[in-house]
């Protein structure tokens, strides 16, 4: 998807806030329906190459929502972080097949890669779901309250740089390595940075999870 197509549209920012150091939540007016887990292309001008972001809001929400890291060297996120309510934004129609269904599933996420799972929970996909979320610091567990309320004991937080009440002291991949009996009849969804996704997928395969049960999406 190198350029915005004719069916992409101009919209406006409805809110933007920093929810953690250098991490922002942005909402905008939307005119389409989407499936929980899908992505959109975002740009500030219609002719720009878009950057892909998973939608983090619920499918019935009146507005679209994305979460993003502010990367100082990035071509888009520093400018996105400076937007104000009412500013213009170009957003593609949603697309992608990393989507939720009613089947039992384990969700594995790191960083802002938790966005599609936030959308899935907010869209009502809660039954028979487990989320293992990784973050460097205690403030890195975005949408934590939503997940705690919806998933209860099926919400696991793995923190690599800090310790605290209810936090597993280590990476998501370390937690996965320590599990001795992963269920083979559930779906596994992995989303986050490339290194975590590849490592987690390798661990699942080593533990004899059927390859067709593993779905992944990489955040660069």
Image (tube, rainbow, N blue to C red):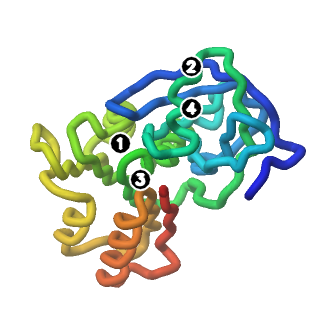
Disc nearest the viewer among 3 and 4: 4
The residue beneath circle 2 is: 15
The numbered mark, 1 or 2, whose residue comes first in the sequence reads 2
Residue contact at pointers 1 and 3, CB within 8 angstroms: yes
Q: Position of residue 120 (x, y in %)?
A: 52, 45
Q: Dot 4: within a 10 Å radius of its alpha carbon, few (fewer than 14), some, or many (20 or more) residues?
A: some
Q: Residue at x 20, y 65 (%)?
A: 174
> What distance separates the C-alpha of mark 1 from that of mark 2?
27 Å
Residue contact at pointers 4 and 2, CB within 8 angstroms: no
Q: Residue furthest right?
A: 6
Image quarter in which the N terminus is found: bottom right
Could you tell me if residue 125 is visible in this image? no
The residue beneath circle 1 is: 151
> What distance separates the C-alpha of mark 2 from that of mark 3?
30 Å
The numbered mark, 1 or 3, whose residue comes first in the sequence reads 3
Mark 2 secondary-structure assignment:
strand
Q: Dot 3: within a 10 Å radius of its alpha carbon, few (fewer than 14), some, or many (20 or more) residues?
A: many
The residue beneath circle 4 is: 80
Disc nearest the viewer among 2 and 3: 2
Disc nearest the viewer among 1 and 4: 4
**Residue 90 vs residue 99: left or right?**
right
Disc nearest the viewer among 4 and 2: 4
Query: Residue 144 appears in which quarter of the rendering?
Result: top left
Q: Position of residue 44 (x, y in %)?
A: 69, 34
């Amino acid at each position: 998807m190198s350029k915005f197509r004719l069916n992409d549209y101009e919209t406006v920012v409805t809110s933007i806030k920093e929810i953690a150091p250098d991490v922002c939540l942005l909402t905008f007016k939307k005119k389409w329906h989407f499936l929980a887990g899908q992505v959109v292309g975002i740009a500030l001008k219609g002719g720009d190459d878009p950057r892909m972001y998973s939608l983090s809001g619920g499918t019935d929400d009146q507005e679209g929502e994305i979460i993003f890291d502010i990367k100082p060297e990035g071509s888009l996120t520093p400018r996105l972080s400076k937007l104000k309510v009412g500013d213009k934004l170009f957003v593609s129609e949603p697309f992608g097949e990393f989507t939720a269904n009613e089947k039992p599933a384990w969700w594995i996420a790191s960083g802002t890669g938790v966005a599609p799972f936030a959308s899935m929970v907010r869209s009502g996909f809660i039954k028979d779901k487990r989320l293992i979320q990784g973050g460097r610091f205690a403030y890195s567990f975005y949408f934590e309250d939503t997940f705690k309320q919806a998933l209860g004991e099926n919400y696991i937080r793995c923190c690599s740089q800090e310790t605290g009440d209810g936090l597993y002291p280590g990476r998501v991949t370390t937690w996965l390595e320590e599990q001795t009996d992963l269920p083979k009849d559930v779906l596994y969804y992995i989303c986050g940075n490339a290194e975590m996704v590849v490592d987690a997928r390798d661990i699942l395969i080593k533990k004899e999870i059927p390859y067709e049960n593993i779905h992944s999406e990489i955040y660069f």
